[in-house]
Image: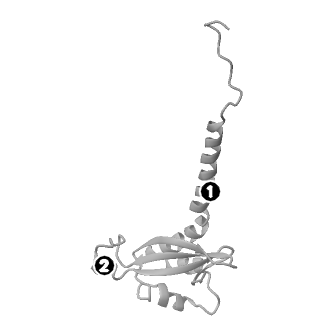
Amino acid sequence: MTLFDKPAEPQGKSNSLKYTLIAVALAALIGGYFTFRNYPEKRAVTHFFDALIAGNTEQAYELWQPLSSYRKGDFLADWGNDGYYGPIKSYEIMDTMRCKNSNGVVVNVAISPFAPMPDPSDAVKSRRTKVVSIFVDSRKALTAYSCSE
C-alpha cells in the first residue's frame, strides 16, 4: 500500500442513516394517525356548527339526522337562537374521544354566543361559553351524547 492508495473499506459499515430515516418515517406515520384518525367526525361537527352559525337550521337539522320522535320544533328548542344552546356565534373543537364498543366518536365542542370565541381571560364573556359533547356515529348521524371509558 502506498501513500496515494485509498484506505480499505471498513467491514462493519454503520447503517445509522438508514435506521434514522426509518425511525423518522415511523414517527411521522404514528403522529399522522393520531392527528387525523377522527378527522371525518370533526368535519361532520364543523359542518353542523357552521350551518347553525349561518342561521341555516334546515341544513343543521338534516345533518343531525334525528329519529322521527325528535321533530324540528324540538331541534330548534335545543339549537335555535332562542334554544337551550343558542344563540351560537362561534365554536371551537376541543378534543375527541372514541368510546369503547362503539361505532363513533364523541367530539367535545366549546360554543359561545359571541363572535369571535372569547379569550379565557375575559371572564364576563367566557362565563357564557358552554361545552357540548356531540356523538358522531361513524356510519350515520350526530347526536348529543357522552360516554364513559
The answer to which of 12 and 29 lies nearer the viewer is: 12
Residue 145: give x, y in percent of width and height.
57, 84
The answer to which of 1 and 19 lies nearer the viewer is: 1
**On residue 100, which mark appears?**
none
Residue 36: give x, y in percent of width and height.
59, 61
In the rendered view, tell whether residue 3 sits above or below residue 80.
above
Residue plotted at (62% across, 64% down): 37
The answer to which of 49 and 110 lies nearer the viewer is: 110
Q: Quadrant of residue 39?
A: bottom right
The residue beneath circle 2 is 125
Neighbours of disc 2 within 10 Å: few (<14), some (14-19), many (20+): some
Residue 58 visible somewhere in the drawing: no
Local SS, label 1:
helix
The residue beneath circle 1 is 30
Residue plotted at (65% across, 44% down): 22
Residue plotted at (68% across, 18% down): 8
Looking at the rendered structure, the kind of residue marked 1 is Ile
In the rendered view, tell whether residue 138 sits above or below residue 2.
below
Mark toward the viewer: 1 or 2: 1
Local SS, label 2:
helix
